[in-house]
Every structure is written in structure tokens, then in C-alpha cells.
Image: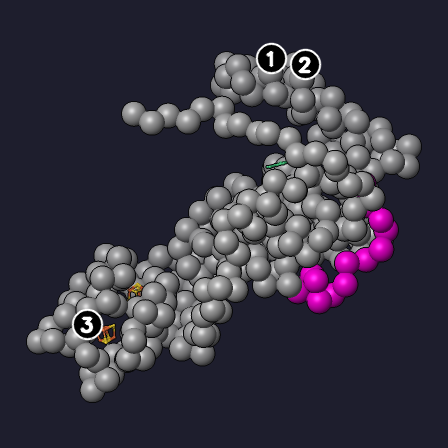
Amino acid sequence: MAIPTSRTHEAATVSIESALCTGCGQCVNVCKDFTLRLCEGKASLAPQSILGCVGCGHCMAICPAGAISVRGRNLGPEDLFPLPPRDRAADFASLQALLQRRRSVREFLPDPVPPEQIQAILDAARTAPTGVPPSDVNVLVLDSLEKSRAFTRDFCEHLKTLRWLTAPWFLTLMRPFWGRANHELFSNFVRPALAAFTGSMDAGENVVTYDAPLLMYFYASPWADPADPVVAATLAMLAGEALGLGTCMIGSIHPLVQWGGSAARFRQRHGIAHKSREGLVVLFGHSLVHYERGIERSFASITRP
Ligand SMILES: Cc1cc2nc3c(=O)[nH]c(=O)nc-3n(C[C@H](O)[C@H](O)[C@H](O)COP(=O)(O)O)c2cc1C
Ligand code: SF4
Ligand code: SF4
């Protein structure tokens, strides 16, 4: 048995070099698939696991003796690397300062983001946890103002085919199925937003992706945990901040390119490989604005029973 993804349908295979194993049991402890057990003071494969080795690699990463190799599910021993020293990792104060200084930026210089910074953002984002490894997140990178503009212009043309989505007759029809929150969102947010997107684009102003010179669209495959692209996009955004770039998440594109023939053609034209439940665009660029103060934010609720 193995958990299917778009990249593999196989379980990973684990090999243990018994001669190296000291029987410390750490690999058994971190394997939540119960693929491993201790038998006569040595790690060995359990007769049954829950899902088949998912290839998380935790056993290889923790083994002090280097006795375990996992191969498969896009993982191998060559993927292990030495941990950066603890004192090079951000402490809470510097992480919090980065988080507090962040603002959604929608005013960008047209200058391109250098390729090494784009690579650094992708390198940071691919460390993201995923529902099940290997990551089933896909990233569309549009690395110039021309590309991001062309994508957004085409998106706005596609939106013109979706006018029925916010037509009063459609919203009335859907009201009993969608419930109140969706009805209010579609009437008071989606409808005016779509009109503003298309109207502004026709007038030469981009209020969808704000002419950012770098756009990354994170989306999943149908096999993935729907939250995976959102987690990766969040890390990408923070990486952009750490590089001194302005960033902004754009949630309005993904849901509008999922359903119908026009959306399928849009995805095909832009090399978007899958429909998926969740996805997120992140904008990056050198900011034209600099904020003087932070803004306190709060959650809708924090419950501690
Ligand atoms: C999931 C998500 C989707 C968002 N979608 C958009 C969007 O489509 N357009 C936009 O201008 N801003 C978008 N934003 C940015 C929010 O509007 C912004 O985070 C919010 O106004 C708070 O401002 P701050 O990020 O500066 O704290 C999005 C943010 C998130 C987290
Ligand atoms: S972590 Fe390594 S040394 Fe320890 S039991 Fe597992 S294989 Fe053996
Ligand atoms: S890779 Fe993960 S699931 Fe597979 S044996 Fe190691 S710890 Fe268990």
C-alpha cells in the first residue's frame, strides 16, 4: 500500500545496515508509520506498517550511526544535508520583527527581481511541511513585469466569461445551497471585485496583481492536502520579506480559474498543470512605499477550554 500523489504511487523502500545500528531506537520513535521496530537490539522492518513508508526521511535524518537509507517517493540518501548551526537560525525576536514589519505591498518598482533572489525564495518555500511527502505543490513563476502583466490581462479576459457567476439570478438560485456567508460574499465582494478587475484592466490599470515584476502561483495537484500550496506560499512570502522585497498574497485568482471551459483553456495557456482546491498567488518586487508604523492584528477567536 502507498499514498498516491501526482509524482509517485509507490511506497519508499528502507534499508538498514545492521552492522552500523546501535539499537538506540530513535528511528523507531520518529517513524509514525510504524514501518520500523527494534528486534534483538537492532532496527528492522516491521511486518506491517500503516500506509507503507511515506518517505518522510525522518529515520535517516535522525540516525546517529547513518545506518538507514530510504529510497523512493522522490527521496534518497543524497537528499540529506548537514543542519545549519543553531546560532544561525532566526531567534524569536528576529522572526517577530520580520513578521511585524511585513505589510501587504501593492506598489512596486518595475525592476525585475534578480534570478538569485527568485531561487532563494523557491529554496525557502520548498522547505514547507506537506500533508504527505513528496510535495504535490506546483509553482508557476512569472519573473518579469511583461509576463506578470500578460498573465493578468489574460486572467481579466477570462473573467469576462464569468459574469453569470455574480448575476442576481444565479445568486438567488444558489442562496439555499451556498448559505448566507457565500451569498453575502458573492454579492458584496466578488461581484464588485470582478467588475473592478476587468474595468480597471480595460482602462490600463492593474488592480489584480498591481504590476508586480515577480508573481509566483502556488497550486496543488488533486492528490495533495489542499492546504499545502498555502503553506508553501506563506514561506515564500516570508522569504521575500527577509530578502527586503515587498510582498502581497493574492487569493482572487485561484478560485476563478478552476471551473469551466474558459478556466481550463486559461490553465492550459499558462502551463498550470492541475485544478486544485486551494492555491495562492504571491507578488514580489521592490516596494515603492515604506510604512512608518505596524498595525495590531487579532484572530476572530482564541478558545482555551
Ligand atoms: C489568503 C489571502 C488572500 C489575499 N488576497 C488578496 C487579493 O486578492 N488582493 C489584494 O490586494 N490583497 C490580498 N490579500 C492581502 C490582504 O488584503 C492583506 O493581508 C490584508 O489587507 C491585511 O494587510 P497586511 O497584510 O498589510 O497586514 C490577501 C491575503 C491573504 C492572506
Ligand atoms: S536510529 Fe540508527 S542506530 Fe538507532 S536504532 Fe535506528 S538504525 Fe539503529
Ligand atoms: S522514511 Fe519515514 S515512514 Fe519511512 S521508515 Fe523512515 S520514518 Fe518511517
Say which label, 3 or 2, has the lower sequence index. 3
Residue at x-position 61% and y-position 47%: 98
At label 1, which amino acid type do we have?
Thr
Badge 2 element: helix
Q: Is residue 116 left or right of residue 239?
A: right
At label 3, which amino acid type do we have?
Cys
Q: CA distance from mark 2 to mark 1?
A: 6 Å
Residue 116: within the magenta?
yes
Q: Quadrant of residue 29?
A: bottom left
Residue at x-position 20% and y-position 87%: 19
- Where ligand 3 lies, by image quadrant? bottom left
Q: Which residue is at the front of the view, 159 or 64?
A: 64
Q: CA distance from mark 1 to mark 3?
A: 64 Å
Q: CA distance from mark 3 to mark 2?
A: 66 Å
* Residue 5 visible in the displayed image: yes
Q: Which residue is mark 2?
A: 168
Relative height, residue 225 to residue 59 (above, below): above
Q: Crowdedness of circle 2 by 10 Å Cα count: few (<14), some, many (20+)?
A: few
At label 2, which amino acid type do we have?
Pro
Badge 3 element: loop
Horizontal and vertical percent for residue 190? Answer: 67, 25
* Residue 222 visible in the displayed image: no
Q: Quadrant of residue 162?
A: top right
Q: Which residue is mark 3?
A: 24
Q: Crowdedness of circle 3 by 10 Å Cα count: few (<14), some, many (20+)?
A: some
Residue 11: within the magenta?
no
Q: Which residue is mark 1?
A: 172
Quadrant occupied by the C terminus: top left
Cβ at disc 3 under 8 Å from ligand 2: yes
